Image (tube, coloured by chain):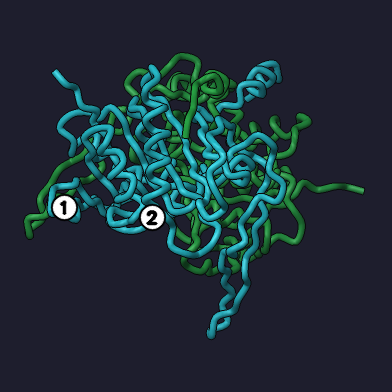
Chain colours: A cyan, B green
Amino acid sequence: MVTVMRILLTNDDGVYAPGLRAIRKELQKLGEVTVVAPVGEQSAVGHSITLLTPLITQEVLDDEQKPMGWAVEGRPADCVKLALLELLKEPPDLLVSGMNAGSNSGINVLYSGTVAAAIEGAFFQCTSIAVSLQYTKPKPLDFAKAAEYAGKVVAQIVRHPLSRGSLFNVNIPSLEKGPIRGIRVVRQNVAPYKEQFDRRVDPRGRVYFWSGPDFGCPDPHPDTDETALREGYITVTPLHFNLTHSVMLEKMKDWEWTI
Amino acid sequence: MVTVMRILLTNDDGVYAPGLRAIRKELQKLGEVTVVAPVGEQSAVGHSITLLTPLITQEVLDDEQKPMGWAVEGRPADCVKLALLELLKEPPDLLVSGMNAGSNSGINVLYSGTVAAAIEGAFFQCTSIAVSLQYTKPKPLDFAKAAEYAGKVVAQIVRHPLSRGSLFNVNIPSLEKGPIRGIRVVRQNVAPYKEQFDRRVDPRGRVYFWSGPDFGCPDPHPDTDETALREGYITVTPLHFNLTHSVMLEKMKDWEWTI
């Protein structure tokens, strides 16, 4: 008997995004892939979920007119919930979220819909991997080539025995910077980012702000996803969703408290 | 010379929410409070941010027609960014996000716009505290009484020397369950939640799903925010935004990797 790995694929760029198509092709070499992804682009939605509007779903076909999965009018995390609770006949062995157009490293991990979908999978005890491709210039990305690398990394992760709900964040460096230098297992960068707003006044005198384009980390910590990516390495970061600051927790237990 | 603590207050229920008004009154006993909050309700938006639409801002007055701060047509995290980078003349000594109508414990910490706003403050190295009030029944909450408790907890946290960007999550138990039993410093619950969708078909034959109301954790881990809150304690959980799974990180460094 041959057992086939069942893979749930989602993303935050939408079901028709080229990054999803590219990684799907690679994941099909590893198992049976079902897509459940948002209808449209959902970047920077973080771990938002939809409570107050209905989630409309629709079956979608791939370029060869074969069933590919479902498009959902919702957030990436909604897609994962719906897939696991309603749409898939059996629980998947692996969830992959991506491949995102743009890296998700440093504090972007917390803004990212791509990573949120993977975290949602881990909530449900499913091994989950977020995959993103860095871009450094506004030109078409070589998703096909990047997806080859990503597929290899995914294969190397899942060949290890993993506890339920294991969670990983993978970034592929921009391929325009030259050959990839290797794979590095690194922690998430937490050094502060620099950003700015563009202040404007509308024709009726109201003040408004655009989020500026120059969001970046001027001084990332060494040995992190941020630095390794800049140096041309594929980064792999194991994540968890317990935000408890354990050291501070122990300290605070000794504080005096009164109500 | 008297130094006054400058407090930035935000939330995810909107600038006109009663929970914000109530906690503002208590925080004014501790310092000078400026509100920068979303115009309308933003629950379960997680750590989403607004990149593709402009953030319209408007000055708002309180019930006594005195300047209170700004309303922003954006997400809680947008409000914090705008406050710190554009709207406030000086950086605040403390950020408070809340008081949210509904607890933010367990994995809800990751869905919560209230907590996301506090995390955003911590990104900017500001001491940040998310405050939420549990509700167990759909009736008006006693925000005034709960805010008194919350104010006291905030005061007790900030009297300690804290490193920059310290981050806390505070939950007040439902006041309908009887007197509060005390304050407990506890970790975030990470036990799985149970939830379901309500599947329907629209008049045109399209399938859609409503997120069900019975989202809950049937079997929370002991000594966590989830259990302590159920037992009637105020919970305080120190958080951080480094999602790296450190134990797994060390293990994975020994794995063989090839590109």
Task: Please state the chain letter of the residue tagged with numbered disc 2 in the rendered image.
Answer: A
Residues flagged by tags 1 and 2 on a common chain: yes
Residue nearest the viewer, comparing A17 with B32: A17
Task: Please state the chain letter of the residue tagged with numbered disc 1 in the rendered image.
Answer: A
Picture residue at 17% right of the left edge, 49% below the top: B208
The three-letter code of the residue at mark 2 reads Gln
Q: Which residue lies furthest to the top in this view?
A: B222
The three-letter code of the residue at mark 1 reads Leu
**In the visual, does A190 lie left or right of A133?**
right
**What residue sits right under mark 1 in the picture?**
A61
Residue nearest the viewer, comparing B144 with A204: A204
Figure check: B96 above or below B190: below
Task: Mark 1 or mark 2: name the one nearer the start of the chain.
Answer: 2
Provide residue B183's location: percent of width, then percent of height: 59, 22
Q: Which residue lies furthest to the bottom in this view?
A: A203
**In the visual, does B225 lie left or right of B209?**
right
Which quadrant: the N terminus of chain A? top left
**What residue sits right under mark 2 in the picture?**
A42
